[in-house]
């Protein structure tokens, strides 16, 4: 399973599935991270946490632990 925290900086990936339960999953879905959405990984903080992504034309910073819950497909052209 490939997750968002393993994606390369500067790539665009597609969301396959959002894992997790309860409030964590709801928060990710409320932020627009849904199946089929394209995510552009902009940058990662020097110590690896948080990471900045662009989804649905807005920038979002998420924790690495939350990024592990986002299963991705492959790079999108």
Image (spheres, rainbow, N blue to C red):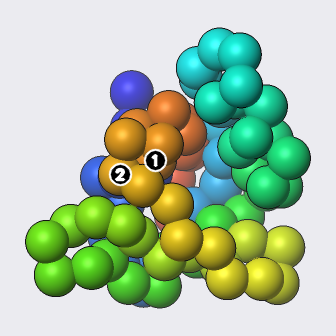
Q: Which residue: 79% across, 55% down?
A: 31
Determine crowd level at label 1: few under 14, some 14-19, many 20+ residues with C-alpha closer than 10 A. Answer: many
Determine crowd level at label 2: few under 14, some 14-19, many 20+ residues with C-alpha closer than 10 A. Answer: some
List x then y, in percent, for residue 28: 71, 43
- Camera-side residue: 28 or 56? 28
* Image quarter in which the N terminus is found: top left
**Tag 1 and tag 2, C-beta contact below 8 Å:** yes
List x then y, in percent, for residue 16: 66, 37
SS at circle 1 = helix
SS at circle 2 = helix
Q: Is residue 9 left or right of residue 58?
A: left
* Image quarter in which the C terminus is found: bottom right
Q: Point out the residue furthest to the left here.
A: 47
Q: Which residue: 31% across, 77% down?
A: 44
**Of the numbered discs in the image, which one, if any, rests on residue 64?**
2
Q: Which residue: 59% across, 23% down?
A: 19
Q: Which residue: 63% across, 73% down?
A: 60
Give the residue number, with chain letter if any, for mark 1.
67
Q: Quick check: can you spot residue 76?
A: no
Q: Is residue 50 left or right of residue 36?
A: left
Q: Quadrant of residue 58?
A: bottom right
List x then y, in percent, for residue 3: 42, 41
List x then y, in percent, for residue 23: 71, 25
- Camera-side residue: 4 or 52? 52
């Amino acid at each position: 399973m490939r997750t968002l925290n393993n994606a390369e900086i500067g790539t665009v990936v597609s969301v396959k599935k959002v894992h997790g339960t309860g409030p964590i999953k709801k928060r990710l879905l409320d932020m627009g991270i849904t199946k089929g959405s394209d995510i552009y990984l902009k940058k990662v903080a020097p110590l690896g946490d948080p990471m900045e992504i662009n989804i649905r034309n807005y920038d979002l910073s998420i924790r690495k632990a939350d990024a592990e819950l986002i299963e991705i497909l492959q790079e999108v052209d």
